[in-house]
Image (spheres, rainbow, N blue to C red):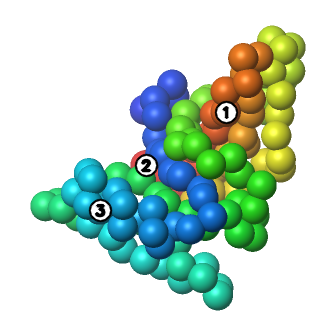
Amino acid sequence: MSKKNIGKVAWMDLTIDNATTVSEFYNKVVGWDIQSFDMGGYEDYCMNHPETGETIAGVCNAKGVNAKMPPVWMMYVGVENLEASLKAVSAQGGNILGDKRPDGKGGYYQMIQDPAGAYLTLWEEGQNED
């Protein structure tokens, strides 16, 4: 596995009740272009750089597997070994929230809460990700 993403913010997204309205808010406030994608009955959104088209963040509806996500900007930080990091979360007084999920590219992620109550998602890069 590549170690290029360890300790880096690899992704960020926001899960809220009305992703359509909020994606339009960030389009007007920040300037991100909006690209919708079908989630099987509703749309979530990639927020893209207006010139390069690079996807910067996601704005998602609080539905399906995201139904219990807190309405905060969630950072996904790369770790070398997700299981070892989750053990450290518990040992250091944090909480492991929800279930470990596949990222669709061979990796996995898991939401945690630090001892102060702040949320973060830990992500282990898959073998087939560059």
Tell us which disc is closer to us: 1 or 3: 3
Secondary structure beneath dot 2 equals loop
Q: CA distance from mark 1 to mark 3?
A: 25 Å
Dot 3: within a 10 Å radius of its alpha carbon, few (fewer than 14), some, or many (20 or more) residues? some
Q: Look at mark 3 in the image and give the residue it sits on.
A: 27
Q: Report the mark closest to the observer, 2 or 3.
A: 3
**Screen quadrant of the N terminus:** top right
Give the number of the mark in front: 2 or 1. 1
Label 1 environment density (alpha carbons within 10 Å; few <14, some 14–19, many ≥20):
many
Figure check: 82 above or below 43: above
Distance from disc 2 to disc 1, alpha carbons, whole Å, reads 26 Å
Tag 1: residue type? Tyr
Residue at the image position 73 percent from the left and 42 percent from the top? 110
Between disc 2 and disc 1, whose residue precedes? Answer: 1
CB contact under 8 Å: marks 2 and 1? no
Image position, residue 113 (x, y; %) = 74, 29
Mark 2, other Cα within 10 Å: few <14 / some 14–19 / many ≥20: few
In this view, which residue lies farthest toward the top? 92
The image quarter in which residue 23 lies: bottom left
Tell me whether circle 1 and circle 3 mark residues in contact (CB < 8 Å): no
Residue closer to the observer: 20 or 84: 20
| Quarter holding residue 38 | bottom right
Q: Which mark is drawn over residue 130?
A: 2
CA separation in Å, label 2 and label 3: 29 Å
- Image coords of residue 118 (percent x, y): 67, 27
- Report whether residue 31 is seen: yes
Q: Which residue is mark 1?
A: 119
- Residue 55 appears in view: no
| Left or right placement of residue 97 versus residue 111 in this view | right
Identify which residue, 37 or 102, lies in the foreground.
Answer: 37
- Please, what secondary structure does the residue beneath circle 1 have? strand
